[in-house]
Image (spheres, rainbow, N blue to C red):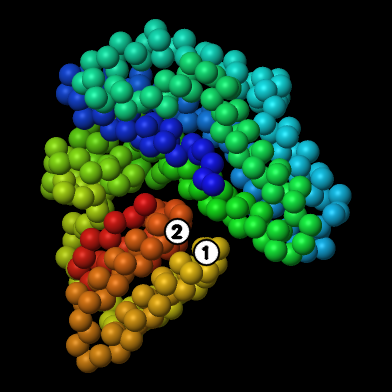
Amino acid sequence: MSTQSIKPLVEQLERMVLSVSADRNIDNSDLRRVLRFVSKVVQVVNQAFQNIYPLLVEIQFLRQEDINSPKIDEIRKELMLLSSRDYFRDVELICGQLAGLGEQYQNQIQPIILGLDMNTQESFAEIFALLQEHEGYILRIFMELTNEMDQLLAKANDANSLDVVKQKAAHEAREMKQSLNELQLISNKILGLSGKDGFLELTETDRLQIRDEISYSFNFIDKSIRTGNITGSHIAVGSGIQMSYQDDHSTGMKAEDMAKLLDSLIGEIRKEGLPPEAEEKVVKQLEVSKDELKEKEPDKEYIGKNIEKATKTLKSAGAFIDAASSIGQKLLAIGKWLGIAVALL
């Protein structure tokens, strides 16, 4: 059974930034108002969900000797606390913050959003639900997840039943980690905490870059997106958001350098905690690429296809890979040597 997640909400926050930045009828001041609002929503959602992730990781690493021990009872109590209304109202103050954001939305943001086409407005249903239901929206997700985990923990009386709950926790932890990472990335890009001008500054200097950046970073496909050079090291391509480069593909690296880079990449992937089947598949795809590099004239197209398959396998397994991550940087370096675009996230 797959529990509810915050992924749809995260995707809609990303889509809201993309939609308002792409609409020429929205002036720069209103765009900044929406960006600040999204940043505040991200902060509250992050605050609400960040405490469940470490608890899922703790469950993931339970050992057989923990069966029937006080440790499992303690975890179950923590799960129940996290799904209580009092926790969000009194401890985390989520209720009050969401009420304030709901009022801000109604008075300042909704008039701007109403200027978008009807289909776009309807695509923000999860955001509207969060602002209307306040902590009730979060509780609904928490209760479904914590209840299922609690029931599995209650049945964990042998190695097999413990493995079931650990696998479930590992899956939910990966999903949660990816969503929290994306939330952090949204905030970083809006506020300029990712090493270059943030979206707030770009409203006055290059609005098109906001659209390109959000499309590239979160893999949105939007055929209206311009193509061509933009500030930074990538361009957004309308038929599918991928990474490209302003300079040529000559990196000064040789095939043996690429083989070493692939070895390093395989080592990073083995530390990622992927499901065993997915890890084996990715490693095999990279090993095949290494073998091809031993040829006198390596087939770069063949290697590129294997890299593309490996990237897709990583993403489908729940790995969060962006240009700032170690895995992402290695994939982009390999793509640059091959002269191909590598789609991250």
Q: Position of residue 12 (x, y in %)?
A: 37, 32
Does the image show residue 288?
yes
Work out whether residue 209 or residue 215 is closer to the camera in this orientation and state it: 215
Residue at (28%, 60%) from the top-left corner? 342
Mark 1 neighbour class, 10 Å CA radius: few under 14, some 14 to 19, many 20 or more: few
Q: Position of residue 100 (x, y in %)?
A: 52, 13
As drawn, 261 above or below 33:
below
Where does label 2 land, which residue? 317
Q: Amino acid at mark 1?
A: Pro
Q: Position of residue 287 (x, y in %)?
A: 38, 80
Q: Quadrant of residue 258?
A: bottom left
- Secondary structure beneath label 2: loop
Work out whether residue 15 or residue 341 is closer to the camera in this orientation and state it: 15
Work out whether residue 202 or residue 140 is closer to the camera in this orientation and state it: 140
Where does label 1 land, which residue? 275
Residue at (28%, 82%) from the top-left corner? 254
Does the image show residue 257?
no
